[in-house]
């Protein structure tokens, strides 16, 4: 019996959702279209194509046939509401990335990359959906780098899952990120023991603490700005841990780099370069794998 080609299934599923969103079928199904004919009436596609598109969405579990009409399932919830980051999940951000990849030839030729609606909230929703094993493992790796610390400044971290995990372990936690990201995550963390501070992660005057942890923050910036973030961290804390996909270490880092190219900003930085940035401020520098995580940890510690 042949093995299932799961990679083929995944790209086709994203392409299916991309098509449904691009032609307006997702919006129609999310509002008042409960049949294929209604979808066709509200979009520019013909009834037969609408029937086949709706059937494929049902087959992939995005729609359920109830009392003669189609209703969105929980798999489509992230496309229907953006109020709670926990409800968004991974798919909307992955679809945004697919949208940018489709436009990549034009982007590489100088065109502005597409900026899908709700892109930031989708990105934060994907980060919030990180598995608990991954979150615990990444925080454990950071804690091991600063076993005597109790104050941590977390840079990035999407929906704040790692910040909450630090707080649950008894750390005094400040989540530091750009104003728009802090504003988006504030309702989610209102009842957590996490302080929020809006600012630019490239700011040379980061708050002093025992440990700085960057979660995917370096790849959001180009090399010059990413180096400035590392330099600011070395001035603010005796230990810094940057959790990211580094070229030369992570298997998928080269593809992550194309994700950033498609987005028109940032890069997956080379592990050798990141080590050299850390070495400018820290005597003990290493890059290590993180169990249960696709990312690696670049760790810098002051040697006394």
Image (cartoon, rainbow, N blue to C red):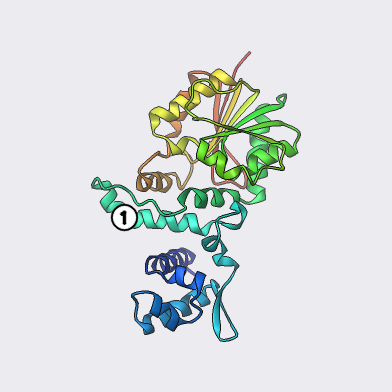
- Locate residue 245 relative to residue 254 in the image: left or right: right
Q: Find numbered disc 1 in the image and state the secondary structure of the residue it sits on.
A: loop
Which residue sits at x=40%, y=75%? 42
Q: Position of residue 119 (x, y in %)?
A: 46, 51
- Where is residue 220? Give x, y as percent: 45, 38
Residue at 64%, 36% in the rendered image: 141
At x 64% / y 46%, what residue is drawn?
188
Seen from this angle, which residue lies furthest bottom? 68
Q: Is residue 157 left or right of residue 23?
A: right
User: How many discs mark residues in the rendered view?
Assistant: 1
Examine the rendered structure and indicate whether residue 27 appears above or below residue 127: below
Question: Camera-side residue: 301 or 77?
Answer: 77
For mark 1, what is the residue? 103
Q: Is 34 situated above or below 287?
A: below
Is residue 45 placed above or below 288 in the rendered structure? below
Up the image or down, 73 lies above or below 268; here it is: below
Query: Residue 87, image x and y in percent?
Result: 60, 57
Question: Which is nearer the eye, 97 or 289?
Answer: 97
**121 relative position to 168: left or right:** left
Quadrant, the C terminus = top right
Q: Residues within 10 Å of mark 1 (few under 14, many from 20)?
A: some
User: Which of the 4 image quarters holds residue 37?
Assistant: bottom left
Residue sticking out furthest to the top: 304
Q: Residue at x 35, y 48 (%)?
A: 262
């Amino acid at each position: 019996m042949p093995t299932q080609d799961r990679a083929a299934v995944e790209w086709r599923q994203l392409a299916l959702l991309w098509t449904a969103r691009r032609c307006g079928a997702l919006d129609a199904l999310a509002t008042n279209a409960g049949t294929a004919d209604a979808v066709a009436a509200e979009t520019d596609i013909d009834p037969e194509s609408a029937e086949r598109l709706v059937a494929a969405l049902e087959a992939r579990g995005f729609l359920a046939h109830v009392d003669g009409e189609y209703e969105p399932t929980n798999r489509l919830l992230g496309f229907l509401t953006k109020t709670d980051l926990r409800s968004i999940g991974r798919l909307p951000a992955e679809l945004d990335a697919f949208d940018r990849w489709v436009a990549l030839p034009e982007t590489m030729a100088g065109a502005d990359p597409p900026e899908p609606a709700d892109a930031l909230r989708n990105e934060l929703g994907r980060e919030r959906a990180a598995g608990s094993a991954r979150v615990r493992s990444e925080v454990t790796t950071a804690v091991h780098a600063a076993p005597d610390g109790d104050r941590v400044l977390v840079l990035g971290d999407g929906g704040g899952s790692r910040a909450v995990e630090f707080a649950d372990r008894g750390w005094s936690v400040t989540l530091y990120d750009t104003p728009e990201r802090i504003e988006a995550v504030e309702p989610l963390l209102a009842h957590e023991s996490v302080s929020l501070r809006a600012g630019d992660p490239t700011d040379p005057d980061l708050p002093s603490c025992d440990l700085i942890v960057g979660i995917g923050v370096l790849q959001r910036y180009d090399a010059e700005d990413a180096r400035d973030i590392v330099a600011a961290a070395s001035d603010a804390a005796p230990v810094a841990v940057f959790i990211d996909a580094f070229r030369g270490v992570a298997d998928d880092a080269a593809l992550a780099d194309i994700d950033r190219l498609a987005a028109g900003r940032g890069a997956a930085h080379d592990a050798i370069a990141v080590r050299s940035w850390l070495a400018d401020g820290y005597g003990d520098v290493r890059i290590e794998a993180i169990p249960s995580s696709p990312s690696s940890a670049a760790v810098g510690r002051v040697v006394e």
